[in-house]
Amino acid sequence: FRCCSSNGSGEKERTLGIIKPDGVSGNYTDRIRKVILESGFHINKEMIIQLDEDNAADFYAEHSSKSFFTSLIKYMTSGPVLVMILEKEDAVAHWRHLIGPTDAGKAKITHPQSIRAMCGVDLEKNCVHGSDSHQSAQREIAFFFKETPPDEAVRKHDEL
Ligand code: GDP
Ligand code: MG
């Protein structure tokens, strides 16, 4: 597998993957999980959750000024999502490579083997999420799976 650079240390990295509402309702969960495991990821934790508008707006805060924000929040709250911590060496880059480009319509042409090509529809309904950096992954994992003691978690969340 030759997509991504590695520091060769063999150390595991964690990233956050989400199967979005269209992926869950379209019954792609098993197929996506199969790709994940066959690609050498360990699924460290997973949960199904229904996001409310506040959750989704917090999660996608970086996009709050974009024209598509309202539509994105509506999409992400339209049904349950499956949230997963994915672990392997270079997990962030490998998972982004596996899911393919944001625009699932284009992915079908340029990256036909990608997960978004398999189950996504267009620029918005692209069926999966992946953290875009190691730093984003840490924030997003903490967002869903608070591993710090409750007080600390609340404080960190307020600081974001
Ligand atoms: P990602 O990191 O590849 O998921 O893409 P972004 O962080 O840029 O955008 C977050 C999510 O917003 C995407 O996965 C899409 O679901 C949605 N999105 C991104 N760009 C657009 C856009 O131009 N229009 C619409 N309607 N949705 C978008
Ligand atoms: Mg992004």
Image (cartoon, helix red, strand yellow):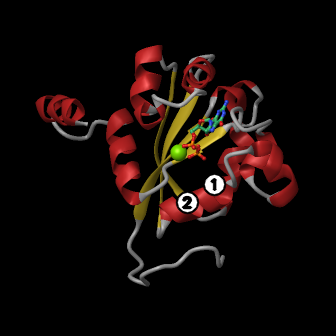
Which of marks 1 and 2 precedes in the sequence?
Answer: 1
Residue 63, compared with residue 87, is above or below; it is: above
Residue 78, compared with residue 28, is above or below; it is: above
Question: Residue furthest toward the right?
Answer: 109
Whole-percent x and y of residue 40? 59, 65
* Rendered image quadrant of residue 129: top right
Cβ atoms under marks 2 and 1 closer than 8 Å? yes
Secondary structure of the residue carrying tag 1 is: helix
Asked if residue 94 lies left or right of residue 22, the reply is left
Give the Cα distance between marks 2 and 1.
6 Å
Asked if residue 109 lies left or right of residue 114, the reply is right
User: Quadrant where the N terminus lies?
Assistant: bottom right
Which amino acid is tagged 1?
Ile
Residue 101, compared with residue 148, is above or below; it is: below
Q: Say few, some or many: other residues with alpha carbon within 10 Å of mark 2 (under 14 / 14 to 19 / 20 or more).
A: many
State how many labels appear: 2
Whole-percent x and y of residue 24? 68, 29
Task: Give the labeled residue for mark 2.
Answer: 41
Which amino acid is tagged 2?
Phe
* Rendered image quadrant of residue 142: top left
Residue at 55 percent across and 26 percent down: it is 69
Whole-percent x and y of residue 77? 56, 18
Residue at 87 percent across and 55 percent down: it is 109
Task: Give the labeled residue for mark 1.
Answer: 36
Q: Say few, some or many: other residues with alpha carbon within 10 Å of mark 1 (under 14 / 14 to 19 / 20 or more).
A: many
Residue at 51 percent across and 36 percent down: it is 83
